[in-house]
Image (cartoon, rainbow, N blue to C red):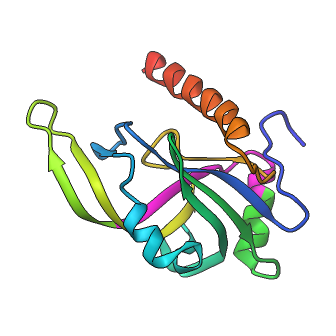
């Protein structure tokens, strides 16, 4: 396993943030805290699809847990064995070659900031979350193969992700 590798447990489980609140993505959208609340209450994790590159012909697993916390949309998923794409992704994730997450959604309530032209997303109808090569939101990444059960562990993860995002912004 390389220094950049991300462990996936023996069942193919992984975790990370699919969206980060208050950060501008490459499309000029900012997801606001609470944006997923209504959609998650209605659908639950089982109602959200786990796809590859947003392709509805490429289901690769299931979401076991999707929750909003103070930082963003925390997800815990499992790649299903015996699916060619899932097996390949498992190797790519473990090797550190792929780690992006991206949400597929329809905006239900949004506002445009006139000064910056950014769109603030206040309510989102979440359809799917994909493993992607290039996420629109820099902080939307697979972070761990270990399912973290409490906010203290996620807090450490958020700090690391925030530092990574800040370094990326400084470089650019």
Res. 151 image quadrant: top right
Instruction: Name the residue: 35% across, 42% down.
Output: 26
In the depicted structure, whether residue 53 falls above or below residue 146: below
Bounds of the magenta span? Answer: 92-105
Instruction: Name the residue: 58% across, 23% down.
Output: 163
Instruction: Name the residue: 91% across, 64% down.
Output: 10
In the depicted structure, whether residue 169 falls above or below residue 92: above
Q: Nearer the viewer, residue 48 or 68?
A: 68
Q: Quadrant of the C terminus?
A: top left
Instruction: Name the residue: 38% across, 67% down.
Output: 38
In the depicted structure, whether residue 83 falls above or below residue 119: below
Q: Quadrant of the N terminus?
A: top right
Q: Is residue 98 magenta?
A: yes
Q: Nearer the viewer, residue 162 or 79?
A: 162
Image side of residue 78 versus residue 56, left or right = right
Image side of residue 94 versus residue 160, left or right = right
In the depicted structure, whether residue 116 falls above or below residue 102: above
Res. 23 image quadrant: top left
Tell me residue 36's x, y (percent). 41, 60
Q: Is residue 102 magenta?
A: yes
Tell me residue 93's x, y (percent). 74, 53
Tell me residue 161's x, y (percent). 60, 32
Q: Is residue 53 visible?
A: no
Q: Is residue 51 visible?
A: yes
Res. 124 image quadrant: bottom left
Seen as rendered, the residue at the extreme left is: 114
Tell me residue 83's x, y (percent). 75, 81
């Amino acid at each position: 396993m390389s220094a950049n590798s991300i462990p996936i447990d023996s069942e193919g489980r992984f975790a990370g943030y699919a969206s980060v609140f208050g950060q501008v993505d490459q499309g000029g959208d900012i997801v606001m805290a609470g944006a997923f609340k209504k959609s998650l209450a209605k659908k639950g994790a089982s109602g959200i699809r786990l796809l590859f590159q947003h392709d509805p012909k490429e289901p690769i697993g299931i979401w076991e847990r999707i929750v909003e916390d103070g930082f963003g949309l925390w997800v815990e998923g499992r790649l299903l064995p015996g699916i060619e794409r899932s097996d390949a992704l498992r190797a790519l994730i473990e090797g550190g070659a792929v780690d992006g997450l991206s949400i597929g959604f329809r905006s239900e309530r949004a506002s445009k900031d006139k000064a910056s032209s950014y769109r603030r997303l206040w309510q989102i109808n979440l359809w799917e979350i994909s493993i992607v090569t290039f996420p629109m939101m820099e902080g939307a990444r697979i972070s761990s193969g270990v399912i973290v059960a409490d906010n203290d562990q996620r807090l450490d993860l958020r700090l690391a992700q925030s530092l990574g995002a800040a370094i990326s912004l400084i470089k650019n």
